[in-house]
Image (spheres, coloured by chain):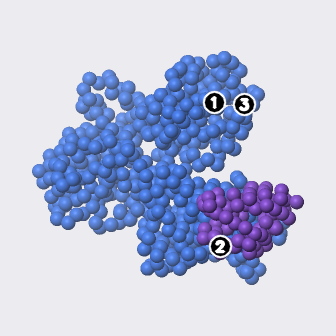
Chain colours: A blue, B purple
Amino acid sequence: MVVAIRVALLGDTATQWMVQAIRDAGGSRRLDLRLWEADFSQIEQQVYDPGSALYGFNPQVVVVYQSAQKLLGAYNRMEPGARRGLAEERMAQIGSLRAAIRARSAASVIYYNYPEIDDGVFGNYSNKTDYSFLFQLRKLNYELMRYAMQEDGFHICDLAVLQLQMGRAMFFRPSVFVVTDMEISIEALPAVAEATVSLIGALYGRVRKCLVLDLDNTLWGGVIGDDGLEKIEIGMLGIGRAFTDLQYWVLKLRQRGVLLAVCSKNTESVARQPFDSHPDMVLSLEDIAVFKANWDNKADNIRQIGAALNISLDSMVFLDDNPVERNMVREILPEVLVPELPDDPAEFLEYLYPLHLFETVSLTAEDGERTKMYRTDLERSAERLSYADEAAYLVSLNMSSRVEPFNGFNGPRVAQLSQRSNQFNLRTVRYTDAEVLVMAGSPDVFTFSFTLEDRFGDNGLVCAVILRKMPEEGLFIDSWFMSCRVLRRGMENFTLNIIAGFAREKGYRYLRGEYLPTARNGMVSDHYFSMGFQSQGGGWVLDVQTYNDRPTAVRRIDQ
Amino acid sequence: MSRDEILLAVTKVFREVLDNDNLVIGETTTAGDIEEWDSLTHIQLVVAVEKRFRIRFGSRDIQGWATIGEMLDSIVAKIK
């Protein structure tokens, strides 16, 4: 499914090539970016004029690019005594730009931070001199991070890191800058565009959720089946340090909320040995949501991992040292991202760092717990089998749900769920943090978020519904999306009971639903039919006045 | 590499970058003679020619060529 996203780019240097590069990068990620470019150096004019072409374009993402070269130019022209205020002054400008955009548009803002330039005036002493350019530039980058932390819908695209990774000589071409006012070299633009588009993609739900790992010569050196527990390289043995460092990186991803799975050609009991008993292993079995060690082909295993975790193939990344396996998975499952790995394991990490594998625009407190949640899911499924009667099983779960309108606390998770739910999602409209908050304050919209807790644990916020007022006493179900982890738990019935009851209480006569098919939401194609809606004019209608609550074992928790 | 060979190689680069297989350029050709050659594609041409001859132009080169002939002069001076 190609998504069209309106992106505006405003810069204080020549940006024509950048627009082109961003468009190309979008195409290769199957994002249909509708780009609008401001005239040269028109940032303020466009942002502060409510009637400007920028707002006429109605952007969903505004990319603001203020270059480090121009910042240096501004610094050069300042009185020496004023220079220690450069970062502060620029932060005030950025805050004011952001506020102006927020007042006129729900668009997310992407702001490039500043690649480092040392003008050499103070030498190393610039680190002890608060009015040196380097001091001010680094302060500015730090203040930008602090600002982004507390400002919803404001995201930094890290040019400083890109320049670090590719080197200044590659990033910046002085001769071209002098002639054309273009700061980023033609050679560097693809990487800058790629980073920008990863971020835009993440804003619209293109995030990867799961890292699938090979074991032998990927997570440790050597072959566990041949070399045995004592001989595999990890920790101090051989080049074990390379694998230890990789495992720490993987562990940090898990702690951040990325699901881990193992996919290895091995006998399962042998493959588990290092996790159980090698003292230098960093990862433990608790970190792995799904463990597949067998002699079947890896593409099948990866498909099964996706099914077990209820995630789609394009949200998976596969790491394997063996080029044959990599190519086979690429061939059979082109949706799975399979990074080429260098031959030397010592090079793995530096190769992986810049790939933007797990770009995201939000983290919630729940993310770190995700592996645990999936593991409890597997426990639940195991227990479900022992109950003859599904209804009795559901009652035994002792489920309860907190129902709340969207607000500043649940907003980020609602946005994240809207971006990540692909299967149980009736209309697949993606919302950003900023848009969720706008809806929370709108008198024409009613919003509902649902948590789900049971005796195995807290699933967190799992479902959201957005109702919009329609003319003539009806409410339109703008969005209804739910985490697939809570399918077949009676949550759908509970949700409908809540929103139908709400509509009735408020004096509305009907709910109107619509199903917009995508490549992935086939599971809800009959949703409204099976929930008792009547087909009408290409949509689905439910008379709330005569609606009887549907059976559910979920209880509502009062606030 | 003779001047004619250089012109031939530059022609090839121009055809590729400007996506026009019938493009003909000579010593006296200017940017004004070629529709697709604007300030934007200019930079692309510069980088592509640099790559082809493994040279790097300076800012005066990039800014200054009035004709293809002058570009050839720069290339000749650099590959010596």
Say which mark, if any, is on residue B33. Answer: 2
Q: Chain of mark 1?
A: A
Above or below: residue A463 compared with residue A381: below
Closest to the observer: B45 or A96? B45
The amino acid type found where label 2 is placed reads Asp
Q: Tell me which residue sits at (68%, 33%) in the image.
A: A243
Above or below: residue B80 compared with residue A67: above
Q: How far separated are the C-alphas under marks 2 and 1?
A: 54 Å
The amino acid type found where label 1 is placed reads Asn
Q: Is residue A92 left or right of residue A371?
A: right
Q: Tell me which residue sits at (83%, 59%) in the image.
A: B2
Q: Chain of mark 2?
A: B
x and y percentages locating residue A57 in the rendered image: 44, 70
x and y percentages locating residue A51 in the rendered image: 43, 79
Judged by depth in the image, the label closer to the viewer, 2 or 1, is 2
x and y percentages locating residue A101 in the rendered image: 48, 72
Mark 2, residues whose alpha carbon is within 10 Å: few (<14), some, or many (≥20)? few
Find residue B28 and report its image quarter.
Answer: bottom right
Closest to the observer: A354 or B22? B22
Above or below: residue A135 compared with residue A243: below
Q: Chain of mark 3?
A: A
Q: How far separated are the C-alphas under marks 1 and 3?
A: 18 Å
Disc 3 designates what residue?
A: A240
Say which mark, if any, is on residue A322. Answer: 1
Q: Tell me which residue sits at (32%, 22%) in the image.
A: A386
Mark 3, residues whose alpha carbon is within 10 Å: few (<14), some, or many (≥20)? many
Q: Is residue A439 left or right of residue A346?
A: left
The amino acid type found where label 3 is placed reads Gly
